Amino acid sequence: MSAGFVYLRPLNVAVVRARGPYSQSASAAWGDMFSWLHSSGLKRDVGTGYGLLLDDPRIVAPANCRYEACVELIEEARRLLPVTFSIRRLPGGAYVRERHVGGSVGLSHTISKLRNEWTPGQSVVIDSRRPVIEIYLDNPDLVPLEKQRVDVCLPVKADDYTGRSAA
């Protein structure tokens, strides 16, 4: 794997949330986001797209998992947000990042492999207080699905394990 550490800065984004298994809720949230961007004429004014996986499906029932589709917007666009959207601060901090190619296809495998195979050997643990973040680097209207790049970012913190046994 070509994973590495990165620091993401906090960022204000427009957000729409969907619930359910991530394979369904991600599509639903992005469908709502793109529908609004097209109908509002703001498609050209958006920056990077971010997907936030707020729950661990190994712990939370898939039907209750929350996914947020987020985009950077110009300040003037805030007044055009639908009532079902909100503004939130993308949580910054330390993340382990892996580049995935293929758009949303195979993202869950990349996340699992990064979490289960790469992270354990790095003296870090997953920070469950922050979401997994998908950073969509390519415009899906211009780049074919099989070439779309997504940076998968798992929130991490230092492993506090000292190797000493408790007395």
Image: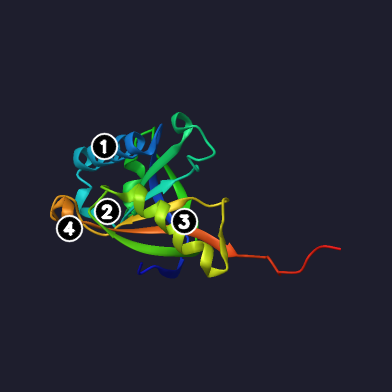
Between label 4 and label 3, give the one nearer the viewer: 3
| Mark 1 lies on residue | 31
Between label 1 and label 4, give the one nearer the viewer: 4
Q: Where is residue 54 in the image (x, y as percent from the top left)?
A: 48, 44
| Mark 2 lies on residue | 46
Q: Residue at point 58% right, 51% down?
A: 129
Q: Tell me the SS state at disc 3.
A: helix
Total numbered badges shown on the rendered structure: 4
**How crowded is the residue under tag 3: few (<14 C-alpha within 10 Å), some, or many (20+)?**
some
Q: Quadrant of residue 83?
A: top left
Q: Looking at the picture, does residue 161 appear above or below residue 22? A: below
Is the Cβ of the residue at disc 3 closer than 8 Å to that at disc 2? no
Q: Position of residue 142 (x, y in %)?
A: 13, 54
Mark 3 or 2, nearer chain start: 2
Q: Which mark is residue 115?
A: 3
Task: Determine the CA span between mark 3 and mark 2.
Answer: 30 Å
| Mark 4 lies on residue | 147
Q: Position of residue 62 (x, y in %)?
A: 45, 33
Task: Determine the CA span between mark 4 and mark 2.
Answer: 21 Å
Q: Tell me the SS state at disc 2.
A: loop
Amino acid marked by disc 2: Val
**How crowded is the residue under tag 4: few (<14 C-alpha within 10 Å), some, or many (20+)?**
few
